[in-house]
Amino acid sequence: MKSYVLTVTCNSTRGVVAAISGFLADKGCNIIDSSQFDDLETGLFFMRLTFSSEEGTPIDVIVSEFETIRKTFGMVCEFHDTGAKMKVLLMVSRFGHCLNDLLYRWKIGALPIEIVGVVSNHFDYQKVVVNHDIPFHHVNVTKANKPAAEARLMEVVEQSGAELIVLARYMQVLSDAVCEKMSGRIINIHHSFLPSFKGANPYKQAFERGVKLIGATAHYVTADLDEGPIIEQDVARITHAQSASDYVSIGRDVESQVLARAIHAHIHHRVFMNGHRTIVFPASPGSYASERMG
């Protein structure tokens, strides 16, 4: 029996939940799980539910007939097949901890995505990628050729059908044009020392200042560098007895886990944009085992 995810965003209005649940019941569907949130500040309503068509009503019929409800409540809504794997393009420079972590999770089935390629401005991880039977694309980036390099990147995106780009420690800044075109479809990971410790060797800077918490942040990429809507964060406590190299090692572990959890939330359609913030619903029972990592 196939199952689907329905995501809904609209103005908070009485009767929305009843209309959706009543419609699905009339179509012979069973709601497996449901999450909802009313933002009292913005007046917006967010909902994510998983349902199965127990009587075999075709999904195209359900989508078509749901249009009346969508128009009535002014909804932005999408239906997704839970069995479909999102096509993801990974990008990396010279720090490979996040890339290696994602490749391992993907290989053992803990990350249910289709990796359609890896783009890098260096050759450091070409062999690793090719050994996983994944296309590797070297796109050299300099100040002089950046427009051409980004045109090549978008070529790869179009040809591969990538639905999501993951910057797995890709150390080049994407242009405003790329950020706008792929809005809500690029996830980045970085340490959580911003804005305190910018530039080179942030972990060394943190060590010198006696920081007691190391963290990481995964967010959507926007034209505002490292300031896009946050999807996932985590921290690890450290002590005075640990060295600067310990900081780096612990930080890499946190970065890898946070990025993987952010990707899981996105591919399971649990993340909703809410201005400069996000609404992130918890993992549903059906996907808990695969989403519970780190």
Image (spheres, rainbow, N blue to C red):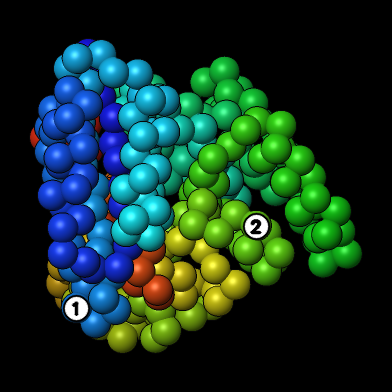
The residue wearing badge 1 is 40
Toward which corner of the image does residue 143 lie, by quadrant? bottom right
Depth check, front residue: 170 or 67: 67
Residue 289 visible (yes or no): no
Which amino acid is tagged 1? Answer: Leu
The residue wearing badge 2 is 181
Helix, strand, or loop for circle 1? loop
Image mark for residue 25: none
Q: Residue 42, relative to residue 241: is it above or below?
A: below
Which amino acid is tagged 2? Answer: Lys
Question: Left or right: 144 with respect to 241?
Answer: right
Q: Look at 62% across and 62% down and name the residue there.
A: 179
Instruction: Sort mark 1 into few (<14), some (14-19) or many (20+) by Cα contacts within 10 Å.
Output: few
Q: Residue furthest right?
A: 144
Give the spatial CA distance, label 1 vs label 2.
Answer: 30 Å
Q: Look at 57% across and 18% down and name the residue there.
A: 133
Q: Look at 67% across and 69% down and name the residue there.
A: 176
Q: Residue 110, relative to residue 197: is it above or below?
A: above
Cβ atoms under marks 1 and 2 closer than 8 Å: no
Residue 83 in picture, x, y percent from top left: 34, 22
Depth check, front residue: 121 or 6: 6
Image quarter (top left, top right, bottom left or bottom right) of the N terminus: top left
Instruction: Sort mark 2 into few (<14), some (14-19) or many (20+) by Cα contacts within 10 Å.
Output: few
Question: Left or right: 126 with respect to 288?
Answer: right
Toward which corner of the image does residue 53 lie, by quadrant? top left
Toward which corner of the image does residue 249 lie, by quadrant? bottom left
Depth check, front residue: 90 or 88: 88
